[in-house]
Amino acid sequence: MSHHVKLRNIERDPRVVLSFDAPRVPGVFLNEYAVLRARAEVQPRDDAWDLLNRLAKVYMSHDAEFPAPRGPGYVVRNSVERIGGVGPWTSASR
């Protein structure tokens, strides 16, 4: 909700890398993962708390409330430029 160092760093240099690791599968040498190279944009939003509260209900429980005080905040939007890693998403781009 606050304008912390990470947001200032994104505003200074919008290149970001997001990585996602799949659950480990026994017996598999290299598990699936995705690496997304993107450009990020920080957007001030009056409804940031509402978005975080909706996500808390999805990922925690239907009656969860986001613990921070209500107020404006920031949303980071990512525009993916390249996808890599190991998984079915890599064969479609080659």
Image (cartoon, grey):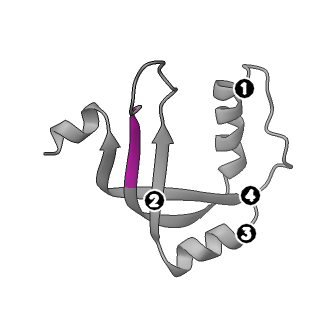
Asked whether the beta carbons under mark 4 and mark 2 sit within 8 Å of each other, the answer is no
Instruction: Identify the residue position indicated by label 1 in the image.
Output: 60
Asked whether the beta carbons under mark 2 and mark 1 sit within 8 Å of each other, the answer is no
Instruction: Identify the residue position indicated by label 2 in the image.
Output: 17
**Residue visible at 79% across and 21% down?**
63
**Numbered tag placed on residue 1 in the rendering:** 4
Which of the two marks, 2 or 1, is nearer to us in this view? 2
**Mark 1 or mark 3: whose residue is earlier in sequence:** 3
**Numbered tag placed on residue 83 in the rendering:** none
11 in relation to 21, above or below? below
Q: Is residue 61 left or right of residue 51?
A: right
The image quadrant that residue 15 belongs to is bottom left
Q: Residue furthest bottom?
A: 12
Q: Point out residue 61 in the picture as x, y percentages from the top left corner.
A: 74, 21
Using the numbered discs, state the Cα–Cα distance from disc 4 to disc 3 in whole angstroms: 9 Å
Which of the two marks, 4 or 1, is nearer to us in this view? 1
Kind of residue at disc 1 = Met
Kind of residue at disc 2 = Val
Give the dominant element type of the magenta stretch: helix, strand or loop: strand
Instruction: Identify the residue position indicated by label 3 in the image.
Output: 4
